[in-house]
Amino acid sequence: MSSTDNTPADKLATRAADEFRGLYGAAPEGVWAAPGRANLIGEHTDYNDGFALPFALPQRTRVAAARRTDGTLRLHSADVPSGVLTLRVADLDPAHPPQPPHGWARYPAGAVWALIDADLPVGPRGGADLHIRSDVPTGAGLSSSAALEVAAALALTELYGIPLARPELAALARRAENAYVGVPCGVMDQMASACATDGHALHLDTRDLRQQHIPFDCAAAGLRLLVIDTRVQHDLADGAYAERRASCHAAAAALGLPALRDLPYAELDRALGRLGDPALRRRVRHVVTENERVVRVEELLRAGRLREAGPLLTEGHASLRDDYEVSCPELDLAVATARAAGAYGARMTGGGFGGSALALIDADAEPAVTRAVTEAFARAGYRPPRITAAEPSAGAHRVL
């Protein structure tokens, strides 16, 4: 599958191609790009077979790539000063992934491993040279890891003529993160990066990977969606994410359910009464109410009533803060300050423990909200936040 970009040349992709020549002594066969994502609503639902409503960001990870015939995989990142890493495709092993200073290489190496593990013809006598350049912020809760996995997987499948549908590509990228990197994430991030379309949010049913593209045009409604990067770094491999996932699975088992997605919203209170552990009750309440919020926000987007989605975003943040306990003081301050400055709603986005928040505002309120949040962070002694406007953008594709 190939979907070459028809938009004006991507300057960072052109730069990546030029850098590839300098590194490897020949031109790449192409440059592929995959975006980061923000999640409008539907957090920590994907590993509970639930619903999510992400969209792709304009920021993308570019991978310049060329095939090899000697079973060698060479990896280089313009964003991490660690030199070229050379690996043998036949030696890729989840038990021994690249280590610092090449920790970033776990993601593209994992994508190669996942393709080989699925018996797709990349090795052992294949291989590739890859050079990576990205403007997706790392540690910001915007899925920089999924963007890298999907971009690398797309480059390799197109180079080797492997016909994968985008959901299959996303599933392989998720396997790379689960089995090779060691993060037990759901599939939402990779699906958004691989499958999103310009000007739309992606309604995703994570049980069967059914998707619908929902029109999401803030500008037409006189609105703007801000991404507030708190610059608090998060690491989902540190155990807290895995603990949340395990607690959800334990609660589903205690309730006799395949997954928490199978608990209807109308039966939530009765189910909570059957759980003795207060922490499990909180986790269940978040997942079930968050699935309901996804359904309600999608209905509002389809009806063109974007402003009315704001309070649901704020409800989602309160649930993540109080029931799922994955927020942090910086995220809470960003949300509260944006709301006080006139946002219709605001919430953290991503796995939590840092990262970014979203704020739905009137377009002409952007300077005032940006100033209010920046000043609040300064008063609190926090690092200055990075605040940008988000536009729903296209998913992974070939750019050169």
Image (spheres, rainbow, N blue to C red):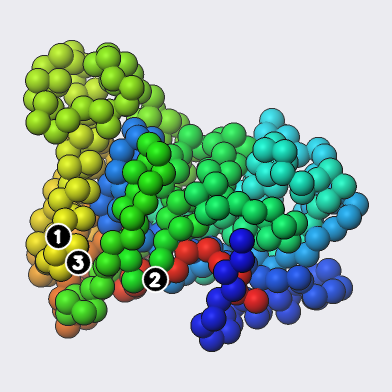
Q: Secondary structure at mark 1?
A: helix
Q: Residue at x 11, y 17 (%)?
A: 273
- Reply above or below: 77 against 165: below
Q: Looking at the rendering, which quadrant does residue 74 occupy? A: bottom right
Provide the residue designation for mark 3.
360
Taking depth in this image into account, of 88 and 112 the one nearest to the observer is 112
Would residue 336 be visible to someone looking at this image?
A: no
Q: Looking at the rendering, which quadrant does residue 159 occupy? A: bottom right
Alpha-carbon distance for marks 3 and 2?
A: 19 Å
Q: Residue at x 66, y 70 (%)?
A: 31
Provide the residue designation for mark 2.
198
- Reply above or below: 325 against 74: above
Q: Residue at x 46, y 58 (%)?
A: 195
The amino acid type of the residue labelled 2 equals Asp
Give how far across and how far down residue 120 sits, in percent: 72, 44
Give how far across and how far down residue 65 sits, in percent: 73, 65
Alpha-carbon distance for marks 3 and 1?
A: 14 Å
